[in-house]
Each structure stands twice: as structure tokens, then as C-alpha cells.
Image (tube, helix red, strand yellow):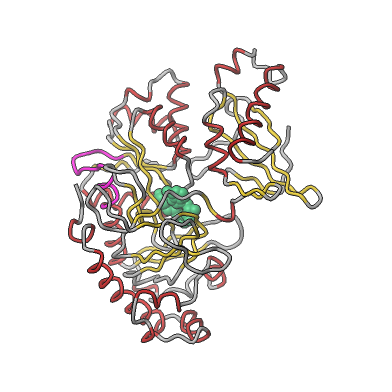
Amino acid sequence: MIFNTKMETLPIKDMEEIQLNRLQQTVQTVYEKTPFYRKKLAEHKVKPEDIRSLTDIQRLPFTEKKDLRDHYPFDLFALPLNKLVRIHASSGTSGKPTVVGYTRNDLENWSEIVARAIVACGGMRDQVLQNTFGYGLFTGGLGLHYGSEKLGMATVPVSGGNTERQILLIEDFEPTVIVGTPSYVLNIADKMEQLGKDPRATNLQYGIFGAEPWSTEMREELERRFGIKAMDIYGLSEVMGPGISCECKEAQQGLHVADDHFYVEVIHPKTLKPVGEGEEGELVFTSLTKEAFPIIRYRTGDIASITSEPCICGRTTKRMSRVKGRIDDMLIIRGVNVFPSEVESVLLEIEELVPHYQLYLSRQGALDKVTLKVEINEQIYRSLGQDLQHEYINVLCNKISHQLKNKCLVSVDIHIEHPGAIPRSNGKAIRIVRDKIAQV
Ligand code: DLL
């Protein structure tokens, strides 16, 4: 099923016409309404009337997270607060939050793209959806909530955390679908097993996961543990929130972008030049319909590629590959680049481990030092008499080390932790801990 057949299966040429029209309108609006963009456009010697084709977008300046911080809280808004009905913010790891706003139309469009995403994942109006994304300033909770309601699903707004209550609701409300971060929903499976319950015995048929990078192996783990299909949804608050793109259940070959609302580009993060179709680079989005907070060429920091090849599901929209990670989170270990999701893939292939891990980064002289902390699985831990000094731990460390070297070409220090030792998050997992020496 397709939620908006007209827009999601439009011939590419027709879509491009719509996009150009909306792009011209957006550039005109920011030029008139936002001093920040007017100044930037002037610096780049470009005027709204210079945008005559979609490739002219490359003449426009980029926008970065720093621009949002520097104009905190509302200076990038194109409308005064009395025209808005919602404000969200993302806390980030340092400094001021980035703040975004929505008009009623913006919320209508956002709900629509999330409804499209849920349907692409197999959602239907008569199902129950349990929403474990955090409700609040984070766009995950309310974003999924409004999309699910728009579709007509019975939406359970449980938010993140309180895992035992999540389990009770899964058992008693019998949702067909659970949505949340992959790491948090995995915690629910852990907890169910600890309580002697079988996560495969619930009514859940599929899950929609996002808000953090997750590996294919993590997908398989979630599918195996819950006996569900695990789907990927992507988005970021600066551009709108969840739903900018989402997988389809027919192919699961990339995430369909809501092309009528966002124009996507992929650039080389150093040269800032566009890369070819299918080549990896940094995702850049321009909003095409947003009223309160239009955004031009926003550099997401996320690494993925794009294709416009047709998909077997019938949708004609562009598709992005799953996000490998954020450029900021890429580790450079003795000259080798590696993303936490690549380390995760290796860990999940080692049956003695569970996928709860953190990478500690510290500087040692001129070199970055990386220590991996990862949990051992409960059964093995018990069979070792709960003794992490056991000689088997050395064997295990060597095995992990060998596989990381083989598959990611990196050497890191490894510390095996007891089950439950790595802090759990109710939302996005913290995979990288900077400037701290791992306590052992
Ligand atoms: O995480 C919005 C969202 C909520 C997306 C729920 C999906 C589901 P922010 O808090 O602004 O917004 O964080 C955005 O999270 O730039 C990516 O680095 C990462 N991210 C989001 N979805 C995915 C995904 C929400 N499916 C940042 N795969 C983005 C990998 C993701 N990374």
C-alpha cells in the first residue's frame, strides 16, 4: 500500500518540476524574511531569480548547525512566533540547543510524511502502534505520534523509559508495531528475557527504528529477538524531524525520500562538491514546503549515498542508503577511518558478546587512543563463575581484536564488561565517550 499514491509515484520529470517551483518559492521567502539568508545570498552573489533550474541550487550557500546556534533561538525563523503552533529543539552534546519551529501547515505536512513512512513499513489504520520515542523537545515522539494518528492507528504514547511498563503494554495492548531507537528497543528484549518472558511471543509484527546509526547486524538481532521485521526511518530536527526518508517493506533497499518536501544532495565533506549517484558523501537537505523554518542546503553531517533507480515497490522517489554514521563520530585510528556502526557489526558476529558497547576516546601524545568496552553475554558470564579475570577473557579479547583488525583494519584496547555494565539509554545510545580514560 502507498499512502499518497500521487506524490509517491510521480514520474521523475513531474517531481522535478514541482521541486523547482517550490525551491524558487523557498529561496524567495528566506531572502525576504530572514536577514541571515539575505546576507549570505548577497555574500555568494546570488539572488532568488538566479535559481532557474534544480542544479542552480549549487549556487546557494550551505547552512550548518553552527548557524542555528549562532542565531539562537529564533533568528532563522521566517515567521514571527505568533504564526507558529509548535517549537522543538535538539540538545546536542555541547552548547546551546538548536531550535526549530512549525506552523499548522508544517505540522500537517510532517504528519503526512510520517504517515507515508509508516505505510511504507507495512502500517495500516487498524493496527496499534507503541511509540517509545521520547515525547518532548525531541522530534521523535511527537513526530511519530502525529503521523500514526494521521494514518488512523491506535497510538500508544508511552515515550521512552520505564521498560517494565513498556513490556506490560506490549503484552496487554498487543501492538502490531513498536517504534523507537534500535538500542532502546533492544533493551526491552533484554528485560523481557530477564523476566523470563519471550519477546517472540508478542503480537508485534514489525518495528520502525531510527534516530541513531544502526548496523545490518543490529537489524538482524532485533528481527531475531522479537521475531519482527525491522524497518529504518530517518530524519533530523533541523530539516523537519523523523520521516524525511524511510524504507519500504517490499524492497528494504534504501530509504525513500519525501522528494516533494525536501531536495536532497550528497556532497564530498571536504571539497563540498556534489558526488555522483551511488557514491557516498554527506547528505544535504533543502526544505521545499516549510513555512516557519525553511532551511537551505543544510549539511547534516550524515554519511550516505543516493539513487534514483526505480524501486520494486512502485515509488519513484529518490532513495538514500542507510546512514553509516555521522562524520563527527568517525574515528581515525592510526590513519584508518572507522564508524562505530562498523565496530558494532563485528561485535554482533561474536556470540559471546551482546551489542552493548561504548568507545572511549582519549589523546595519548599525538595519537588518538581508543578503548572498546563491551558486555559479555549472561550465559558465558555465568559459565565463567562471574569471573572477568578468568583466562578465557584473554582468549575472547584476542578473538575480538583479531576480527576488528580483519574487518575494520584497526586495533583498539578491549575491556570485557559484565552484563548490564554499560549505561543504557532510554533514547539515543551513547556510543562514543570523548576525552575520558576508560575506568577499568
Ligand atoms: O533523531 C529525528 C528522528 C526521530 C529520526 C525518530 C528517526 C526517528 P535529531 O535528534 O535532530 O532528530 O537527530 C538527527 O540522528 O542527523 C542522524 O545523525 C541520526 N539519525 C536519525 N535517524 C537515523 C537513522 C532525530 N535512521 C540525527 N539512521 C541525524 C542513522 C539516524 N542515523
When the figure is inspected, residue 221 is found, relative to residue 159, above or below; the finding is above
Name the spot of residue 221 as percent of width and height, x first: 44, 31
Where in the figure is residue 291, as x and y percent of width and height?
Answer: 34, 72
Q: Nearer the viewer, residue 361 or 70?
A: 361
State the residue at coordinates (38%, 45%): 232
Question: Residue 44, percent across and down?
Answer: 51, 83
**Res. 94 visible in picture:** yes
Q: Is residue 61 above or below residue 239?
A: below
| Residue depicted at x 45% and y 85% | 46
Locate the C terminus by quadrant. Answer: top right
Asked if residue 22 lies left or right of residue 60, the reply is left
Looking at the image, which residue is at 63% across and 29% down? Answer: 400
Question: Magenta segment: does it hold 127?
Answer: yes
Left or right? Give the position of 383 relative to 438. Answer: left
Magenta extent: 116-129
Q: Residue 344 appears in which quarter of the rendering?
A: top right
Q: Nearer the viewer, residue 23 or 318?
A: 318
Q: Nearer the viewer, residue 209 or 20?
A: 20
Is 226 rendered above or below residue 159? above
41 in relation to 306, above or below: below
State left or right for residue 229 relative to residue 40.
Answer: left
Q: Is residue 134 magenta?
A: no
Q: Position of residue 261 (x, y in %)?
A: 31, 65
